[in-house]
Image (tube, rainbow, N blue to C red):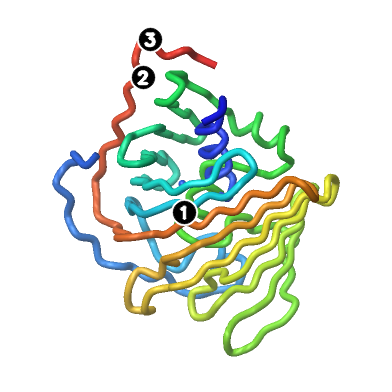
Amino acid sequence: MRNNQVTSLFFLLALIGLIQGCHPRTSSALDRLERTDVRTSLLQGPYAWEWFSCSGQIDMTSSVFTGTGQYTLRMQKDSLLWAVVRFMGIEVARIQADPDSMVVLNRFERKVDVYTWEEVRKKTGYPASLGTMQRTVLGWLPLVTSSLEILKTSAEGMEVMGKEGVIQVNAFLTEPDLIPSACVYRDLSSGMSAEGNQTGVLDPKSLPVPGERSWDMKVDEKSRLFLRIHVEDPNLSGPLEFPFDIPERYARQ
């Protein structure tokens, strides 16, 4: 792999958007929340949660890397996101994000990268945060803008549009839980766009987490990144552990 490849992969997964050995977990029944107005419902989500875990596969195609990896992910609401990524069964990176920053432990290059959310927002124009990251993992609309506008409604769902800074978002929200089945982000200053799709939402009586997500990002005519993320075994049980020890020999960036 070329330099910073693993870090770049994690960084992109975080914006759009992603060891066993945890404490014994107790099962948690799905607590569905009352549907109110659209914006409030989008902000609170379709169900209450404190802990979340899943695993799955990542397929990536780009000019710098093409391949398939596996991941394990855990979250505590408004507190932590933790993930491990493996390629060919070997751990290559570990990530931990909290309300202040995201830390990437790069096993391949033996270094640690730290990104504050403020730095991410300045560099990308996208209002990235732990909250938007966790909402992306759950399959909810990540960016619920104050200017959210309902363009069209039907029995299947509704089409919405909103703008936050230089970022414009258009999405189709599927009933009954307003889980986006399609979403497009556009950077109105640079022209960069990212198109996402989600399929395989489970039965409404079960955990409504999309089982497959894909993102097609175009920076310019010559630069493109395609990600497909498969989500398996979504679970709301907890508590969970988030092991994240940094070896002394790793360089700090």
Q: Residue furthest top?
A: 249
Q: Is residue 132 visible?
A: yes
Between 232 and 157, which is closer to the camera in this rendering?
232
The spot of residue 128 in percent (x, y) is: 62, 42
Residue at image coords 43%, 34%: 95
Residue at image coords 45%, 67%: 210
The spot of residue 93 in percent (x, y) is: 41, 32
Callout 3: SS: loop
Tag 2: Cα neighbours inside 10 Å, few (<14), some, or many (≥20)?
some
Tag 1: Cα neighbours inside 10 Å, few (<14), some, or many (≥20)?
many
Residue at image coords 41%, 46%: 69
Decide: is 85 above or below 119.
Answer: below
Please, what is the three-letter code of the amino acid marked with disc 3? Arg
The CA distance from mark 2 to mark 3 is: 9 Å
The spot of residue 177 in percent (x, y) is: 49, 74
Q: Which residue is mark 3?
A: 249
Residue at image coords 34%, 15%: 247
The spot of residue 142 in percent (x, y) is: 58, 55
**Does residue 85 appear left or right of residue 224 in this picture?**
left
Q: Residue furthest bottom?
A: 155
Q: Which residue is mark 2?
A: 246
Between 235 and 227, which is closer to the camera in this rendering?
227
